[in-house]
Image: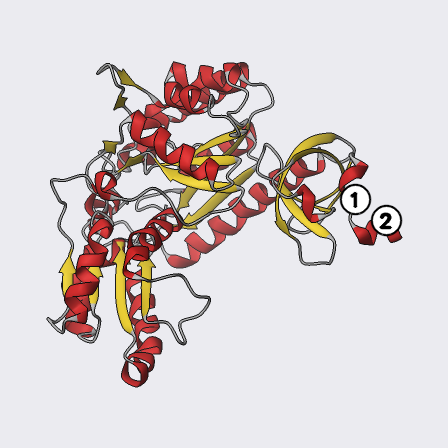
Amino acid sequence: MNVYDSARMADVLAPLGFCPVDSAEGADLVILNTCHIREKASEKVFSELGRLKPLKDRDGTMLAVAGCVAQAEGEAILARAPYVDVVLGPQAYHRLPELVARAARGAGTALDTDFPVDVKFDHLPAPATAQGVSAFLTVQEGCDKFCTFCVVPYTRGAEYSREPASVEAEARALVANGAVELTLLGQNVNAYHGRDETGAEIGLGALMRRLSRIDGLKRLRYTTSHPRDMDADLIAAHADTPAVMPYVHLPVQSGSDRILDAMNRGHTAEQYRDLVRRLRSARPDIALSSDFIVGFPGETDADFEATMALVAEIGFAAAYSFKYSPRPGTPAALIAAQVPEAVQDARLQRLQALLRDQQDAFNRALIGKTVPVLYAREGRHAGQLVGKTPWLQPVHAHASNAAAGQILETRILALAPNSLAGEICDTRFDSAERRSA
């Protein structure tokens, strides 16, 4: 979502004459767009501001801090780094031109961390910054779940869903700019409940069916989902809408009901297993990824083994796993029974080893098969392009630049450390290097 937000900030600044550059040196304005999910995020911000301060002192470069750290710690930023020109939360970036102009007039630091009554999406221009073959599109923001470990409800606010017409208009603009694949974004994207032109409320499944009718749009993805919001219509969309890719990121966090309850997740491990069964019934080739937290306060060896058992039973194509990180202001940070660091480390190593084995097995199962790959960018080597399978695995193959933006049948040849090696079946897209070989 921060990648999407950064692109939209570039769009709103364009009328003031700003355009993106590759490095901070020589820039007129540097924006640090921040995330507050993990610990020490604010310290990283202050460290980066310290590195950038000489540019301000020497060249007069304006400095801005945006995103969730700005939302949570705006006053602290002003106290520790008074040389910062603009501080704004994620709900206010449509007002960035006004804040930059105010700071440029020498009126002091421009601070905006309010949750405005007006909807920022109503004030944003059509996307002008091309994101490439694959683009992000925010359809939902905020969270009403209040998991006890999470700061998102406090930094992103209450759940809000954009109107379908607004989403479709932006999707069409992104496709016109070259996007072939869209990833719909939200803190709880499957909680989407926008109202269409008739006033009827529609969910994420219906929204994706609507977007799938846009000429030139070939693939749809969505992230991040919450198990409580995975409804029957969304599951059905995986079966009846070919553009919806067979991949779901569905965080579970723990396999222990006791820990899930302490986390205020609102579902049990068995309910999660049932969702997986229903998804696989609707789309047998679907791949799953998930999030896991080990060492949540009070987690026992038995709780952790329940997580390991759930992972072993379900099998994941990919996963993000972390040690529990106390976030200031969250209920879990106040629990006395914090798990020792050494125990967290040992549990995380075991879990990650199992998850790596599952990911390798999933990727290895494609060797020798032919799958459609959307090629998006040049690889590290001459005459090489990199793309993604329907299951989000990166594939590199020798191909001409004409293959960029194309979905091409590709035979998977081998498993590389962080990708798959493939061979495009259509010789029209052979690279010069491959033809000469």
Image spot of residue 198 (x, y percent)? 24, 14
- Looking at the image, which residue is at 27% across and 54% down? 67
Q: Amino acid at mark 1?
A: Asp
**Residue at disc 2, secondary structure:** helix
Q: For the residues labelled 1 and 2, say whether their Cβ atoms are less than 8 Å apart.
A: yes
170 sits left or right of 248 in the view: left
Is there any visible trace of residue 363 in the rendered image? yes
Q: Within the image, what quadrant is residue 275 found in?
A: top left
Q: Nearest the camera: 406 or 361? A: 406
- Mark 1 sits on what residue? 430
Q: Nearest the camera: 81 or 338? A: 81
Q: Residue pushed farthest bottom?
A: 58
Quadrant into which the N terminus falls: top left
Q: Residues within 10 Å of mark 1 (few under 14, many from 20)?
A: many
For the image, the number of numbered tags is 2
Is there any visible trace of residue 226 in the rendered image? no
Vertical position of residue 286 compared to residue 157: above or below: above
- Residue 23, numbered label: none
How far apart are the two marked residues, 1 and 2, measured between alpha carbons?
7 Å
Q: Within the image, what quadrant is residue 142 found in?
A: top left
Q: Amino acid at mark 2?
A: Arg
Q: Nearest the camera: 361 or 332? A: 361
- Looking at the image, which residue is at 51% across and 41% down? 178
398 sits left or right of 88 in the view: right
- Mark 2 sits on what residue? 435
